[in-house]
């Protein structure tokens, strides 16, 4: 009885995910309810792109869906969404619904369940995202999303101005999709953005950042940035960013960095916009970047600033020592990432700030055996015991000096040699 339903074969989805979601749709159908795959998964399958998750839309009310499956999480039951666990994987199953009363250009105040799938599709943002696919392989595509995908066009469902005014985030999503897919934006849709772009300031930066992260991690972030600039949206965010007078080399370097290095791309963008590390600290907090990401970006920016502003001797040795100090200060991970970033900048034809070849700096980095205090073969306590002294601020200073000297290869990293050197340093300071 089951096999006849499994007409559609997913090419771009993991087979467990496809069969798990098919099972849910089949169960709903067997109980007399309509159910379809919907949104991003249907779009991605049609476009031949990897499907990352599969959402289901159904005529069944959430209370009904909840009773049909053994494992259900009431994720957003008020909005009609429950998460069904099938074959160990979660699937969002949402009741056909329409939204109304967008008071502040972001949140619908009312959700009403409806009986027709076409009505549910009508509330969705773009034609390519407003398609549903049944288990028998039947398409529900009332706004001709497939035609727009074939013509590489992003188009609002309905009147663009109205749709963007309802939820201003859609303007950023529009640019995100155009950038990731390399599509153009339909004329009316673009006009809609220009007409209501001021409403973007209502949107929480967290939602905007999440869309921009996807854009920046995509295959052509430069196109997205250009569209942001042309639309003027960059300057209308709650926390705008000054993209007008950017350094084109830095911006171009973004496209040389592989997409997995998302935070290096952001660093180049921020640096390319002339934002200092101090300003960036504030900006990144307001943009709701996690602490981990903020520290990475700030580390790269401050290393960049230090390298540009600090004067260096001309000889190789003073270069090397300065680099070792920088590595110890910022950590080997940031130092290595920073070198990759320099390589990208250099490939755009801009003179590198390194002063010596990137290859040479990489070799110096590899040569550093001792990269932090915990690599040092001498603990604070051992130092206190050996010198028979009480702890104090002097200790940190001495350990730091031992670290620099052993990292530079001036003294070996063994206990006796380190203690010897500590004694020498202290004696020297006391004279
Ligand atoms: P991605 O591949 O990045 O997940 P997606 O299209 O699946 O893209 P989601 O945010 O996961 O994006 O949203 C799932 C679906 O919900 C969309 O395809 C669209 O139909 C609908 N949707 C999402 N956000 C909005 C919005 N702001 N306004 C209208 N419909 C939306
Ligand atoms: Mg999605």
Image (cartoon, rainbow, N blue to C red):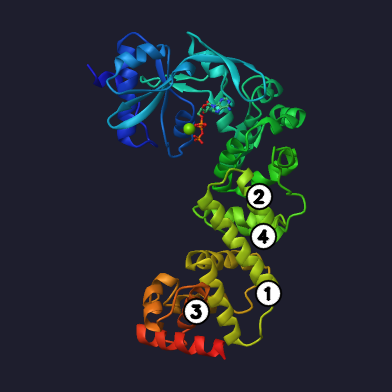
Q: CA distance from mark 1 to mark 3?
A: 24 Å
Closer mark to the observer between disc 4 and disc 3: 3
Q: CA distance from mark 1 to mark 2?
A: 24 Å
Dot 1 alpha-carbon crowd within 10 angstroms: few under 14, some 14 to 19, many 20 or more: few
Mark positioned earlier in the residue sequence (2 or 3): 2
User: Is residue 204 visible in this depiction of the protein?
Assistant: yes
User: Is residue 251 visible in this depiction of the protein?
Assistant: no
* Residue 314 x/y as whole percent: 66, 86
Apparent side of residue 409 relative to residue 164 in the rendered image (left or right):
left
Dot 3 alpha-carbon crowd within 10 angstroms: few under 14, some 14 to 19, many 20 or more: some
Apparent side of residue 239 relative to residue 78 in the rendered image (left or right):
right
Q: Residue at x 71, y 58 (%)?
A: 248
Quarter containing the C terminus = bottom right
Q: CA distance from mark 2 to mark 3?
A: 34 Å
- Residue corresponding to mark 2: 282
Farthest left residue?
Answer: 1
* SS state under label 2: helix
Q: Foreground residue, 153 or 283?
A: 283
Closer mark to the observer between disc 1 and disc 3: 3
- Residue corresponding to mark 3: 398
- Residue corresponding to mark 4: 250
Q: Residue at x 40, y 37 (%)?
A: 12
Q: Are marks 2 and 3 in contact (CB under 8 Å)?
A: no
């Amino acid at each position: 009885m089951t096999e006849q339903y499994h007409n559609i074969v997913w090419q771009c989805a993991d087979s467990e995910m496809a069969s798990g979601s098919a099972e849910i749709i089949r169960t709903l159908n067997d109980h007399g309810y309509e159910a379809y795959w919907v949104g991003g998964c249907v779009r991605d399958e049609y476009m031949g792109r990897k499907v990352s998750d599969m959402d289901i839309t159904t005529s069944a009310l959430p209370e009904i869906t909840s009773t049909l499956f053994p494992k259900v999480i009431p994720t957003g039951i008020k909005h009609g969404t429950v998460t069904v666990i099938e074959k160990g994987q979660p699937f969002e199953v949402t009741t056909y619904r329409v939204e109304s009363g967008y008071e502040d250009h972001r949140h619908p105040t009312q959700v009403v369940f409806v009986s027709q799938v076409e009505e549910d599709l009508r509330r969705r943002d773009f034609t390519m995202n407003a398609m549903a696919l049944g288990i028998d392989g039947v398409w529900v595509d009332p706004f001709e999303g497939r035609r727009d995908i074939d013509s590489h066009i992003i188009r609002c469902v309905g009147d663009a101005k109205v749709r963007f005014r309802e939820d201003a985030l859609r303007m950023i999503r529009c640019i995100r999709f155009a950038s990731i897919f390399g599509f153009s934006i339909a004329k009316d849709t673009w006009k809609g953005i220009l007409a209501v772009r001021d409403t973007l300031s209502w949107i929480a930066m967290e939602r905007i950042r999440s869309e921009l992260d996807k854009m920046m991690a995509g295959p052509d972030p430069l196109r997205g940035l250009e569209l942001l600039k042309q639309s003027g949206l960059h300057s209308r965010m709650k926390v705008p960013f000054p993209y007008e007078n950017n350094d084109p080399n830095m911006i171009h370097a973004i496209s040389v960095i592989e997409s997995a290095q998302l935070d290096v791309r952001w660093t180049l963008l921020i640096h390319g916009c002339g934002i200092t590390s101090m300003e960036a600290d504030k900006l990144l907090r307001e943009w709701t970047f996690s602490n981990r990401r903020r520290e990475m970006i700030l580390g790269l920016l401050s290393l960049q600033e230090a390298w540009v502003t600090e004067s260096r001797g001309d000889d190789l040795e003073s270069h090397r020592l300065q680099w070792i100090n920088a590595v110890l200060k910022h950590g080997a991970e940031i130092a290595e990432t920073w070198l990759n970033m320099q390589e990208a900048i250099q490939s755009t034809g801009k003179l590198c700030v390194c002063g010596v070849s990137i290859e040479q700096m990489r070799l110096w980095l590899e040569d550093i055996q001792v990269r932090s205090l915990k690599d040092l073969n001498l603990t604070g306590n051992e130092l206190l015991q050996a010198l028979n002294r009480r702890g104090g601020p002097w200790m940190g200073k001495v350990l730091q000096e031992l670290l620099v000297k052993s990292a530079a290869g001036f003294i070996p990293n063994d206990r006796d040699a380190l203690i010897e050197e500590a004694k020498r340093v202290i004696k020297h300071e006391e004279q």
